[in-house]
Image (cartoon, helix red, strand yellow):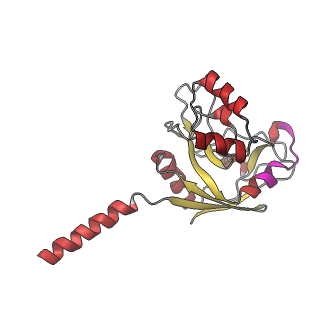
Amino acid sequence: MRLFCIILLITSLLSACNTNESTYAVIATDYGNMRVKLYNSTPQHRDNFVKLVKESYYDSLLFHRVMSNFMIQGGDPNSKNAPPNMTLGNGGPGYTIPAEIGAPHFKGALSAARRPDGVNPQRASSGSQFFIVQGTPQTDAMLDNITQAKGITYSETQRNLYKEIGGYPFLDNDYTVFGEVVEGLEVIDKIAAVQTANGNRPVQDVRINSIRLD
């Protein structure tokens, strides 16, 4: 009986530890792979992303919107077999995710796309579309302006990250960041540099070959 109780205690402790483990995924593209860490602080976004990845939902979709010094966006199911010049960005799985806003938009931030405030005052996220931040290095003056305009107070560590690796702080407190690129930041730069046409769609398709849990 005592041995059983010890085993049960160990099992409970292991289960508790596992809930704190981070989830990782690898986004494979023709420009290289990006390994992303999903945040436990945004459980609804994390679990939804994991669900879609397990369903191979993202395989063969495009990075359909690319803006240099800003971000690369994908996850529209309509992009899978989209002909050239087709307008993209309105597709999804038919549901949204409640906002879990908090983390900043440093370079490499994995953030949920969403519809504008005018039609989406709760800032609910798209069920599948996401963007990965490229951004640019920021200055203290830039961050001071955002603090004044949006009431955001950045820690010294956050300021240093924005100044050293860059990002797009103008989106902070407006979109849900649910992960970050931990390997392959250079892939963002390669994709962000491609030639684009109307709607910021790349002239040559930039495809998400697959996303797999790692």
Which of the 4 image quarters holds residue 158?
top right
The percent coordinates of residue 169 (x first, y second) are: 66, 35
34 vs 20, left or right, is right
Q: Residue at x 27, y 70 (%)?
A: 10
Name the quadrant of the N terminus: bottom left
- Which sits in the foreground, 4 or 169? 169
Percent position of residue 97, x then y: 51, 40
Q: Is residue 194 magenta?
A: yes
Q: Residue furthest front?
A: 156
**Residue 166 seen:** no
Q: Return the residue nearer the eye: 56 or 124.
A: 124
Identity of the residue drawn at 52% across and 28% down: 122
The residue stretch that appears in magenta: 189-198
Residue 99 or residue 78, whichever sits in front: 99
For residue 40, above or below residue 156: below
The residue located at (70%, 40%) in the rendering is 89
Query: Whole-percent x and y of residue 126?
Result: 58, 40
